[in-house]
Image: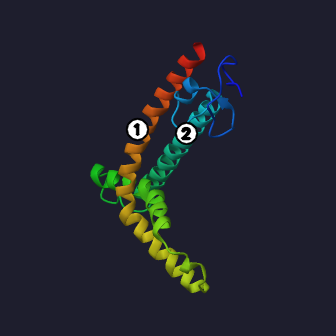
Amino acid sequence: MRCYYHVDREGVGTCNRCGKVLCQECMNVYSPPLCTECAKEMNNQNRINLIKDIILSVAMMIVGGYLYFGGGFAYDGFDLISFLIIVFVFGGVPYGWSALNKITPDIFLIMPIIGWIIYFAIKICLSFCIGWLFFLIKIVQIIIGIRKNKGMSDYISSQNQQ
């Protein structure tokens, strides 16, 4: 079989996503081996996921800010430190929840309704407690992801021009 991009070359492998035949040079362009179209699609999906994470974080931070002012936390006036702490804690709740989902055993699937209510209450409290730590990790991941995504976009563009 011949390479999808270089018809004069013998294919030595395939794209991991779509199965297009690739020559040795094309196999070495991306890791794992991908064709250019799949690399673009994967990069675009990564960009969409980063944007969703940013929107989720900002939305939860807005909820925290709203509760700070509307929930009576600012009764003595505006305190920047407490405002930032509350906003940051609320921004981390989805990531604390996600982390708890990874360690929660499936045994909790069979419970009466009161068990679910207690489980949910404990889980939301723990999400507030640990979410800020996972939010810090997520911020670093988003920054690294944006840099990688930009680098990959530039690299794909340069490959298309050749």
Q: Which mark is residue 143?
A: 1
Give the residue type that dot 2 points to. Answer: Asn
Q: Image quarter for residue 108?
A: bottom right
Q: Which quarter of the rendering shows the N terminus?
A: top right
Q: Point out residue 114 in the picture as x, y percentages from the top left corner.
A: 56, 85
The spot of residue 19 in percent (x, y) is: 69, 37
Taking depth in this image into account, of 75 and 105 the one nearest to the observer is 105
When the figure is inspected, residue 67 is found, relative to residue 56, above or below; the finding is below
Give coordinates of residue 68: x percent, y percent. Answer: 40, 57
> Does residue 69 appear anywhere in the picture?
no
Nearest the camera: 18 or 103?
Answer: 18
Examine the image and state in which quarter residue 109 appears: bottom right
Quadrant containing the C terminus is: top right
Q: How is the image coloured?
A: rainbow
Task: Give the tally of numbered discs.
Answer: 2
- For disc 2, the marked residue is 46
Q: Amino acid at mark 1?
A: Ile
Residue at 53 percent of width and 31 percent of height = 30
Residues packed near mark 2 inside 10 Å, few (<14), some (14 to 19) or many (20 plus): some
Above or below 153: residue 113 = below
For image coordinates 46% across by 72% down, the residue present is 123
Q: Residue at x 40, y 64 (%)?
A: 128
